[in-house]
Image (tube, grey):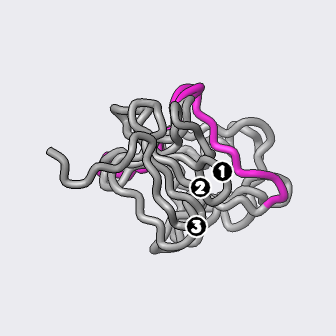
Amino acid sequence: MTRAKDIANIISDANFGGTLDVTGETTLATHLNMGDGDIIKLGASADLQIYHDGTHSFISDEGTGNLIIKGSNELLLATTAGQDILKGTTGGDVKIYHNNAEKLATASTGVTVTGNVVINSGVVKGERGTASAPPFTFSDDLDTGMFNISNAHLGFTVGGSERARIHSNGVVSASAGVALGVG
């Protein structure tokens, strides 16, 4: 057959009963339609696979390297209903959402949590801090809070000055004395 005749035979629908070997780039004018369980395999050893099993859709890295997803500005993981799940901005923050509401965001200074933090097991750790810069403080009053003076000694600070201390033996002391029931 000549090449012109071969092309004329496949201008309408064509069925191939074997492997179609193509040399060069393949461009589709519309869609690539594949059935459930059909796999798009990329790489010499089918390292990257994309498929739908009839229930779930998969992007599977079967190779030895990492699965790297790149975006030029933002990387967004969202539902088809338009709800954000995870958003990462180039050179900026990473945000995690619950029901399309931002709950956790990274920042150059650390992490911001919106809502409650529940710890089912484990320990919350912080630096010792000082009276003028306690590690456990308030967003609108950064020099009032609690800090660790030394091993087994807990300090409470107000306005950047230590005002009370709990010693390892259980004694509580205050820098200006203790006044109970006073005006």
Task: Determine contact: label 3, label 2, CB under 8 Å.
Answer: no
Circle 2 sits in a helix, a strand or a loop, which is it?
strand
Count the labels in the image. Answer: 3
> How far apart, in angstroms, are the residues tagged by discs 1 and 2?
5 Å
Q: Is residue 65 above or below residue 120?
A: above
Q: Is residue 107 above or below residue 23?
A: above
Camera sees residue 77: no
Q: For residue 153, which numbered disc appears in the image?
A: 2
> How far apart, in angstroms, are the residues tagged by discs 3 and 2?
9 Å
Q: Crowdedness of circle 3 by 10 Å Cα count: few (<14), some, many (20+)?
A: few
Camera-side mark, 3 or 2: 3
Closer to the camera in the image, 142 or 88: 142
| Residue in view at x 63 percent, y 43 percent | 69
- Which three-letter amino acid code belongs to the residue tagged 3? Asn
Magenta stretch bounds: 63-92
Camera sees residue 72: yes
Circle 1 sits in a helix, a strand or a loop, which is it?
strand
- Which three-letter amino acid code belongs to the residue tagged 2? His
Q: Is residue 139 left or right of residue 9?
A: left
Where is residue 37 shown, x and y percent of the image?
A: 57, 72
> How far apart, in angstroms, are the residues tagged by discs 3 and 1?
13 Å
Residue 142 located within the stretch drawn in magenta:
no
Q: Crowdedness of circle 1 by 10 Å Cα count: few (<14), some, many (20+)?
A: few
Q: Is residue 143 left or right of residue 91?
A: left
The residue tagged 3 is 169
Q: Crowdedness of circle 2 by 10 Å Cα count: few (<14), some, many (20+)?
A: some
Where is residue 118 shown, x and y percent of the image?
A: 42, 64
| Residue in view at x 47 percent, y 46 percent | 136
Task: Determine contact: label 1, label 2, CB under 8 Å.
Answer: yes
Q: Compare marks 3 and 2 and give the one earlier in the sequence.
A: 2
Camera-side mark, 3 or 1: 3
